[in-house]
Amino acid sequence: MRNYEAVFIFRTEADAYNGGLEKVREQFKKVGANIVKEDDMGDRELAYQIKKESRGHYHFFDVELAPDSIVKLDKDIKLFNEVLKFMFVKKD
């Protein structure tokens, strides 16, 4: 298991944010990830439009998961309409 930081940008509507957040948590559980820390970073203006949205709701995760799980998470999360963009970064 390695430590990763993940940042997700969700649509700003409350239903989209809450629903998308639950879906992401479920995906983490499916691959056996351990969520160490979460932080709701709130709504922010985007530097450029993503999927015709100019604002996004940012959410930070600090997770422990197997490196090969990243590929599965990437494929599954890309299908979620509520998620505008996301990124995983390996911690040192």
Image (cartoon, rainbow, N blue to C red):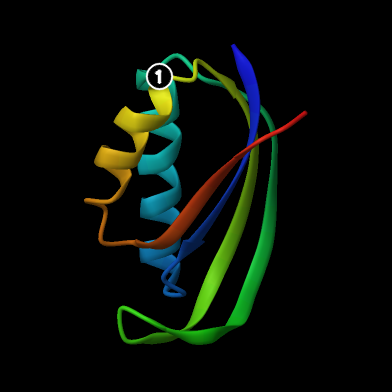
Would you identify the image quadrant in which residue 32 lies?
A: top left
Residue 37 vs 8, above or below: the answer is above
Q: Amino acid at mark 1?
A: Asp
As rendered, which of 18 and 65 lies closer to the eye?
65
Side of 5 relative to 51 (left or right)? right
Q: Quadrant of residue 69?
A: top left
Q: Residue at x 55, y 69 (%)?
A: 57
Give residue 19's position: percent from left, percent from top.
36, 53
In the rendered view, would you say 69 is above or below 40? Answer: above
* x and y, in percent, of residue 73 in the image: 35, 34
The residue drawn where x is 51% and y is 19% is 33
Q: Which residue is mark 1?
A: 68
Q: Secondary structure at mark 1?
A: loop
Identify the residue shown where x is 35% and y is 42%.
Answer: 23
Is the N terminus in the top left, top right, bottom left or bottom right quadrant? top right
Name the residue nearer the viewer: 14 or 6: 6
Q: Residue at x 31, y 86 (%)?
A: 52
- Left or right side of 32 for 51: left
Image height check: is 71 above or below 44? above
Relative image position of residue 27 (x, y in whole percent): 36, 31
Which of the two residues, 4 or 19, is positioned nearer the viewer here? 4
Q: Residue 14 occupies which quadrant of the picture?
A: bottom left
Against 54, residue 81 (above or below) is above
